[in-house]
Amino acid sequence: MLMKEIRTERLLIKTPEIDDKFELTQLINDKDVIKWLSDIPFPYTLNHAEEFIERSQEETLKQESYNLMIFHNGKMLGGIGLRDFYNESCQVGYWLGKQYWGNGFATEAVKSVLDFGFGQLNLEEIYASYKIGNEGSKRVLMKCGFQFYREKKEFDSVLLKEESLIEMIKKDESIKQT
């Protein structure tokens, strides 16, 4: 299914456009944001933003992944995406600019993308991970109904160190579990 955009009560979630590169670069270029993400270059340049936007547009057209930007009143707040599709499952990831933390935007965005994944893409389960210590992300996932799946280690090629993550899972509630 080709996805154009998702609208919630407060948010517009859509594929990034090349004009978003300046806002994206400014918003993500923050050590307090980057430290919770995996494999995001720092400093994040306009070139990185252009490559990400072009790749996101191509992958959305091919329905390989959905890298989306989150907007509120025309202002970019962060990003969210579905990727690593395998059978009827995938991974969700998200981030917000630091000035937008604590306002419920991430929870609202994740819930809407879960609805899209389960309702439109017919996924049966969606995984999410957060780095240990990221209590805000943990709260978002708990509010969205995710459950603990496992602890795992992952090498962050930007921070150049191994990170401990908690992987969580959310199953489609409309499917009867056996």
Image (tube, rainbow, N blue to C red):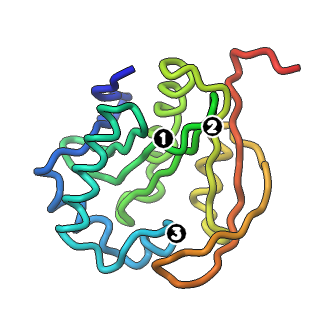
Q: Earlier in the sequence, mark 1 or mark 3?
A: 3
Q: Earlier in the sequence, mark 3 or mark 2?
A: 3
Structural distance between the alpha carbons of marks 3 and 2:
20 Å
Residue 49 showing in the rendered view:
yes
Q: Secondary structure at mark 3?
A: loop
Counting from the top left corner in percent of width and height, residue 157 is at 50, 77
Camera-side residue: 98 or 110? Answer: 110
Q: Could you tell me which residue is drawn at 37 percent across and 28 percent down?
A: 9
Q: Could you tell me which residue is drawn at 50 percent across and 22 percent down?
A: 121
Task: Name the residue that disc number 3 marks.
Answer: 36
Using the image, tell me which numbered label, if any, was put on residue 82.
1
Q: Are marks 2 and 1 in contact (CB under 8 Å)?
A: yes
Task: Name the residue that disc number 2 marks.
Answer: 126
Q: Earlier in the sequence, mark 2 or mark 1?
A: 1
In the shown orientation, is residue 34 left or right of residue 30?
Answer: right
- The amino acid type of the residue labelled 3 equals Trp
- The amino acid type of the residue labelled 1 equals Leu
Quarter of the image with the C terminus in it: top right
Using the image, tell me which numbered label, if any, was put on residue 138.
none
Q: Are marks 1 and 3 in contact (CB under 8 Å)?
A: no
